[in-house]
Amino acid sequence: MKHLFLFFLLLLSSARAWSQNYGLQFDGLSNHLVLCDAPELQIAEAFTVEAWVNAAEWKPAAWQGSIVTKDGAAGTGFALRAGNNGTLDFVMGTTAGWQSAQTTTIMNTNQWYHVAAVVADGTITVYINGVPEGSQTYAGTPVVGTSPVTIGESSGFPGRGWPGIIDEVRIWNLARNSQELNQMMATPLTGNEPGLTAYLPMNEGAGTTTANLLGCDASFAGGLGDDAWVEGFVLAATDVGVTAITNPDVLSIYERPVKVGGTIRNFGVDPVSGFAVQLLVNGEIALEQTYEGSLAAGETEPFVFDAPYDFTDNDNNEVTVQISYAEDDNATNDAATINYERPDGGTVVTVFDARQHNFGAAGQTQSREIILPANMEDYEQLLLHFSVDCPGTGCDPWDQPASIFIDTPQGSFEIARYITPFGIACGPWTIDVTDFKSVMGGPITFRSFIQVWGASGWLLNADLEFVKAETPSYQRINRLWETSNLVYGDPAISYDLPEQEVEVSPMAQSTHLRMTISGHGQGNTDNAAEFSNRTHSLWADGALVAPHHLWKTDCAQNTCANQLGTWLFSRAGWCPGQEVIPFTVNLTDLATPGAPLSLDYVLEDYTNFLNTGYNGSSHTEPHYRIYAYLVEQSDVRLSAFNNLRATGLQIATNGNPANPVFEGITFTVENTGSQDMQNPTLAYFINGDFVFEETIAATIAPGETYLHTFTEVSGFTPGAFNTVVATLTASGDQNLSDDAIHTVISPDLVVDTEVQQALPAFSVFPNPTSGRFEYEVGDPFLGGSIQVFDSQGRLIKTLTIQSNRAMVTGLLQQTGVFYLVAQAPGGHRGVQRIVVL
């Protein structure tokens, strides 16, 4: 589907209508603008701030590059800022503390971007060029302060300057949506727009003030002078680029040939067409394809290479999709790159590898985007393994809450929580995150937060393990309560969680509650909530279901032993240096498929008589961190999903290697989705070259397997190895990673499919190699042989298999592609392709 950013339709005329076009250059040190503190500029539950920015460089952390701020040291106001290789971040003070949302590393230096943050309906959303790129629900209510609005620097935390140009700053007392942002971001305003509370066009071009059309003007400060005026935001006439890689996923890329896909966008003013899109693998051009359509200004469109690519020979793949267009005026956004690393054992994906978190340059939040399998039915269990290590400067000394979230098209979810230990490395811990399977498919962002206040902090390691399923299984997750700071016992603040009603799917076969809850705060009545022994209760449809005694008494048995501090003490649902184990309740007997289910979680009565609020030293207000979901499970899909999968490829021959005839190619596809798939296009490639394609007039129903024999058979090289790859293209297919399958037919006309290659085990490494390699085989191959052929099918040597693993040297002395055919005494056969560089 094409997404049109409407503002570009008016961009050319509106941009040229501006008689002046200036912006202000900030040095990133002390330069800034100061407005005022006014009621209409305060953060609120419906709020928007936006600007055009062009960064000369990125500071190490996103919070260090202030764009528009009104943040006070007492936890008030807001700040829109960016850094960390192009990450946009927005933070605001609430009654629950600082709350923030951020993007991944999206923006480049020396390029104009429209950035915005919107607060609406309990959620912070950050936008880049009108596209929502990150969101997070927040706890509490916004807290206003007395700091003035400041541009190019933090209001309350000096030293967080913006290194670059800022233009067209706007503040609204309402929440603007993506369409509204796109319609107006490149159009000058009159100042009379409803909800607009501040507007700085920055078009004076001289002087040491700039006008705010709706109130107090902005004065230059911090050494900002008349020489700071520069040309304001200008979009290139011709500018097409790649915004993301969306396929393949991190597992399929090492299992089969895959199609590579991404999104391309016209960033410029003029329409573009006829440009080349290239696939680079480890820096070398692997595929090139001309984009035949036309992209209007501001238009974004998915792009998929027609030809599949086989990445399985490389343990590490740097995959780049880039534009090659001689008329392009801006090369900074031409490419997107993702690095793939072969999963450990084929199923364990690295999420974070010694990623530092601190209250310093690294920051408390770290994120990484990973493309996971879109079709999760193949996996019965997802396990998150994680641990913390000490940086070279030592571990942080305190036990602090930490969470791992996923940011998905369906929003953000906390999938795991743990508490850091007192000053030592700990872990690994494991949390089963299968409950989130329904929202973990495709490109998602893993976001880690550690509430650390020291400069040293922690190094986080996290791996995601995929456990294969024998039969498909499906989940659906429903939000119940999500808060990082539910204040407990303050007479002025209600701690009554709202009752939630969920419509249970008619296909649900089992249902359960998953709640991660932990109590925090001390120095209060009953030393709540960290050291307060409480029993809460879960209710369903007005009836008590289960009491919940939130008290962990086994901290002394923690495997992360000999910590500093009070690690032996019992606590409200957690121990220092441990994962927080979710509270689960089976609700299957209470949840009627197709009917509503009402759930309530009631906290035990409690009043904090000692103090309220946080006084900065002797106590932290009692509060709970609660993230709770209702999870439905079934052996049939609980939501719509379109997927046509390549499952088989057969080559028919006359069986006579001396005079070979290739008689037929039969391609098997299966609809593993929930909707009919119609009229797919099927194609095949031989040894990397496209041979033939045809569109079949067929409707393939969910669960149906379809066999198609191609009407043309050609492209084979007799007497040589022929690698055949068959691909499918189907409208609406949501999983491109299983659209290709391959087989190898040897000179003796024996066909070795992917399944045959996998059983029993036969592997070769390293691959690619400089000539020396090792092979590893399963026991059935012992006493058999390995024949080594060149790409033309000429036998180079036959090796006898005497052990499960052996090194081979001096055999492959020329560059090129070779085939190793392992033959077991019992008839098993395996083929591996090896590349010599």
Image (cartoon, rainbow, N blue to C red):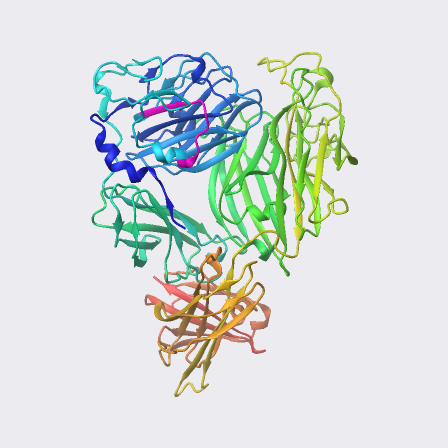
The residue shown at (35%, 21%) is 192
Q: Quadrant of the C terminus?
A: bottom left
Residue 733 visible in the snapshot: yes
Residue 373 percent across, percent down from the top left: 51, 53
The residue shown at (52%, 18%) is 143
Residue 812 visible in the snapshot: no
The residue shown at (67%, 51%) is 506
Give the number of marks. 0
**Magenta includes 171?**
yes
- Tell me: 696 left or right of 217: right
- Tell me: 757 left or right of 491: left
Write down the quadrant of residue 388 in the picture: top right
Q: From which residue to which does the magenta span run?
A: 168-179
**Magenta includes 828?**
no
Reply above or below: 15 against 313: above
Reply above or below: 211 against 470: above
Asked whether 54 or 115 is in front, the reply is: 115
Asked whether 484 or 384 is in front, the reply is: 484
Residue 824 percent across, percent down from the top left: 55, 75
